[in-house]
């Protein structure tokens, strides 16, 4: 097989003061730990000896956002809210994907909508139901975790997982996550090494990490003037209609409403009618 000549992004020089402050702040909030007691950030992981893997975009001032990619033909709205796409009888190699969502200045972003979809073990997408489809929100520390399987190979593509990410009041990022060491990485025309996850075996399963960087400020922009029937803390279902700021909106995807997800700020959840 020909060697993959795709240019590999270079890691930015570390800035100890910023990283020390961030790491201390994350540890102080009780985030899950990885080996050695450090936060389980994808950027802290290292490839095995002799393995040349591009890293998740390094988070510092002026960092490049996670690059977008095409949606593909199989996205479906209204996926169920869940952090696990599997049950006891689901075939396939178990895979956990975890990480954080940051702004461009290394601040964790809470309440980011992450909508995942992927092929099953045979490389097929469920276009009638919602198998291997689900959405979740990052927690107060910007963390997420997804339980799924290693997707099968879809014809003409390398192995990948689709995701949409949207911070409150900001545009949707549509992208894809990739697996290192896949033979088809060198032939897939849209493969981007900047979107490689860090993957390691854990027994018969796999653990993957990836940190998203969204081009949004840490503080959500001011909301339009309130008013109408929309409220926080309501479990809105697809098709529900509300009034907000003098306009009518229809719910596109079921969700539990929260501050920052007002209808004008969340086009992935609400459509103005």
Image (spheres, grey):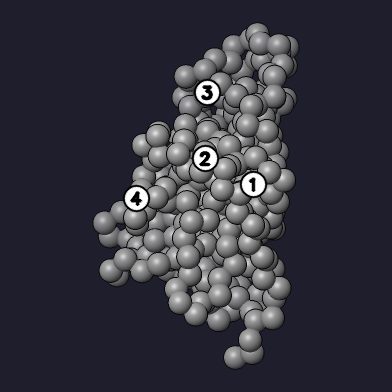
Residue at screen point 41% across, 45% down = 83
Q: In the displayed structure, would residue 149 be above or below residue 110?
A: below
Of badges 2 and 3, nearer the viewer stands 2
Q: Secondary structure at mark 3?
A: loop
Residue highlighted by disc 4: 37
Q: In the displayed structure, would residue 30 be above or below residue 43?
A: above
Residue highlighted by disc 1: 60
**Circles 4 and 1 in contact, beta carbons < 8 Å:** no
Quadrant in the picture for the N terminus: bottom right
Closer to the chain start, of discs 4 and 3, is 4
**Circles 2 and 3 in contact, beta carbons < 8 Å:** no
The quarter holding residue 222 reads: top right
- Near-viewer residue (115 or 191): 191
Closer to the chain start, of discs 2 and 4, is 2
**Circles 2 and 4 in contact, beta carbons < 8 Å:** no
Residue located farthest toward the bottom when viewing the structure as drawn: 1
Rendering coords of residue 211 (x, y %): 54, 51
Q: Secondary structure at mark 4?
A: helix
Specify few, some or many for label 4: CA neighbours under 10 Å numbering under 14, 14-19, or 20 or more. Answer: few
Quadrant in the picture for the C terminus: top right
- Near-viewer residue (205 or 19): 19
* The label number, if any, that marks residue 22 in the structure image: 2
């Amino acid at each position: 097989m020909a060697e993959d000549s795709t240019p590999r992004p270079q890691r930015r020089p570390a800035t100890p003061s910023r990283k020390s402050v961030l790491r201390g702040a994350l540890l102080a909030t009780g985030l899950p730990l990885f080996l050695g007691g450090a936060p389980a950030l994808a950027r802290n992981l290292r490839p095995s000896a002799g393995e040349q893997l591009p890293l998740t975009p390094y988070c510092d001032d002026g960092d490049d956002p996670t690059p977008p990619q095409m949606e593909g033909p199989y996205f479906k709205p209204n996926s169920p809210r869940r952090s696990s796409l599997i049950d006891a009888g689901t075939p396939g190699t178990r895979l956990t994907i975890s990480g954080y969502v940051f702004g461009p200045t290394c601040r964790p972003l809470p309440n980011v909508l992450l909508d995942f979809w992927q092929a099953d073990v045979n490389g097929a997408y469920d276009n009638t139901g919602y198998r291997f489809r689900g959405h979740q929100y990052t927690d107060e520390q910007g963390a997420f975790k997804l339980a799924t399987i290693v997707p099968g190979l879809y014809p003409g593509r390398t192995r990948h997982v689709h995701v949409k990410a949207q911070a409150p009041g900001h545009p949707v990022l549509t992208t894809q996550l990739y697996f290192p060491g896949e033979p088809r990485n060198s032939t897939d025309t849209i493969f981007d090494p900047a979107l490689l996850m860090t993957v390691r075996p854990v027994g018969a399963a796999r653990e993957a990490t990836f940190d998203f960087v969204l081009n949004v400020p840490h503080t959500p922009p001011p909301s339009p003037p309130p008013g109408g029937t929309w409220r926080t803390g309501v479990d809105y279902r697809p098709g529900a209609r509300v009034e907000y700021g003098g306009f009518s909106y229809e719910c596109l995807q079921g969700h539990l409403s929260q501050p920052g997800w007002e209808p004008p700020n969340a086009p992935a959840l609400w459509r103005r009618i």
